[in-house]
Amino acid sequence: MTYLRYWKMSFSPFQRSASSSWFFASNAVDEALARVQFLATHGRRFGLLVGGTGVGRTALVRYLPRYLASTETSIPIDIITLTCPTIDSLPRKLAASLSGYLLGGVRGGQNVKSRAMLEDSLVALKSQLNHLLVLIDDLHLSDHRFQTELGWLLRIEAPITFLATVHDSELRAIDSYLLDRCELRIDLAPWNLEETADFFEQAIEVSGAAEDLFDAQAIVRVQELSRGIPRRICQIAELSLVAGAVRKTAKISSNIVDEAVQELPVGISAAFRSTEDFAA
């Protein structure tokens, strides 16, 4: 019997993946989504989505197309997602992504012979009704050439908004020109206890499990150990489900959560269990 069958869950809501059909929008994420929508619908050129490891930068980028598709906007928005690092040039990568989208312009990256050709095609976007949102994940992992090319693209007057995600400790890796051109910085913070509790409530509901699967103290303990970082919350919750099923418990308690964390490699479990900074 798998742990999902033991808990009568149709799937695990704690396994975060690109194919996951459910997405929890915390208060910070709701605000971030609204700010991204503002950037695109008001024709702003460049914004930064900033946050630490595990707070959900990439998850938000993956969810954005679904969010915008389900939200009424003043103008139609088309989305292209690029992931750093890349050895390809940004103009060529962008042109390849735009293949079949530009009218009378570039038809595939292999046909890009000059910046002028791409610039002409991007300017031609003005004749179309749609606005283009280009999402660049992990800009801090890109090289100098990529960032220089992004700076060049920002100088072109075209209906395009660039949104780049950046690790909060790696802002120094971003070219000063790009930082100066940033029109809106969107910060993603760890969840507070209320947001974590809301996450568990929704997660358990969509999975089909019993409402009281995690008791109140277990959720508090997960919050303490994870320090509100969504990736850690999901990891601890998943391990707790496995540990609880093995022990055939009726629900997940704080003791089960502590036992589950002990199953992690020594260095990782020590980091999870070091809560002094969190408590302070």
Image: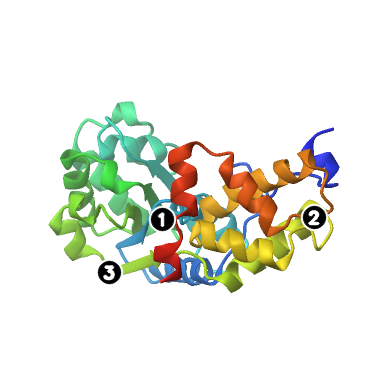
Q: Quadrant of residue 51?
A: bottom left
- If you read the primary sequence from the N terminus, does the residue marked by circle 2 or circle 3 appear first? 3
Circle number at residue 133: 1
Question: Badge 1, how many Cα within 10 Å: few under 14, some, many 20+?
Answer: many
What residue sits right under mark 3 in the picture?
Answer: 183
* Amino acid of disc 1: Leu
**Element type at mark 3:** loop
Taking the spot 49% from the left edge, 53% from the top edge, the residue there is 273
Q: Position of residue 162 (x, y in %)?
A: 33, 56
Is residue 138 visible in the rendered image? The answer is yes
Which is closer to the viewer, label 2 or label 3? Answer: 2
Q: Answer with left or right where residue 73 lies relative to residue 57.
A: right
Q: Quadrant of the C terminus?
A: bottom left
* Amino acid of disc 2: Lys
**Element type at mark 1:** strand
- If you read the primary sequence from the N terminus, does the residue marked by circle 3 or circle 1 appear first? 1
Taking the spot 66% from the left edge, 68% from the top edge, the residue there is 198
Which is closer to the viewer, label 3 or label 1? Answer: 3
Q: Quadrant of the N terminus?
A: top right
What residue sits right under mark 2 in the picture?
Answer: 251
